[in-house]
Amino acid sequence: MLDRKRARQPPDLGELARRPITPLSDPDVDYQKELYTTRFTEALEAAWARLPMPERLLLRYHLLDQVGIDELAVIYRIHRSTAARRCASARQRLVAGTRAELGRAIGVSTRTVDSILRLIATRLDAGDEPLPIEPA
């Protein structure tokens, strides 16, 4: 028995120090993420519904169907810079509307909305071109 104890190597502390530390899950934070992700989705849908139809169609082409700016310019028979400006404007209106809807829905300030969006950002997956949810 004593021979087995002597044969055992002490743990390599350098190896232990190099291992990544994985954060423990916090049930309260997980619940808040789930709740606010649901509220965010509802706010996004409400903001989308409030956009004028031409802006919705433009964003649908660009964000959902992944139609590029050059192709949008051809579809709309406009210059590519005009297409880019229209996309940026529609997207900003959608983001601002979503942020306002979320704030109203849960009754919080803009600063709190920013915190909530940072909290749920890890849960949002909008593909190759994610919705910019950072403060403008």
Image (cartoon, grey):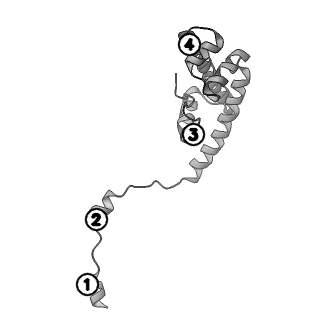
Name the disc covering residue 52, or none: none
Q: Residues within 10 Å of mark 2 (few under 14, many from 20)?
A: few
Q: Which residue is mark 3?
A: 120
Number of marks drawn = 4
Element type where label 3 sits in the image: helix
| Residue 36 placement, left or right of 81 | right
* Residue, disc 2: 13
Q: Secondary structure at mark 2?
A: helix
- Amino acid residing under circle 1: Arg
Residue mark closest to the camera, 4 vs 3: 4
Relative to 30, is 107 above or below?
above
Residue nearest the observer in this picture, 58 or 38: 58
Name the residue that disc number 4 marks: 85
Q: Is residue 97 visible?
A: no
Contact, mark 1 vs mark 2 (Cβ under 8 Å): no
Q: Position of residue 134 (x, y in %)?
A: 52, 28
Give percent across and percent down for residue 75: 65, 15
For the residues labelled 1 and 3, the Cα–Cα distance comes to: 51 Å
- C-alpha distance separating marks 4 and 3: 28 Å
Identify the residue under disc 1: 6
Q: Nearer the viewer, residue 11 or 130?
A: 130
Left or right: residue 54 compared with residue 28: right
The answer to which of marks 2 and 3 sits earlier in the sequence is 2
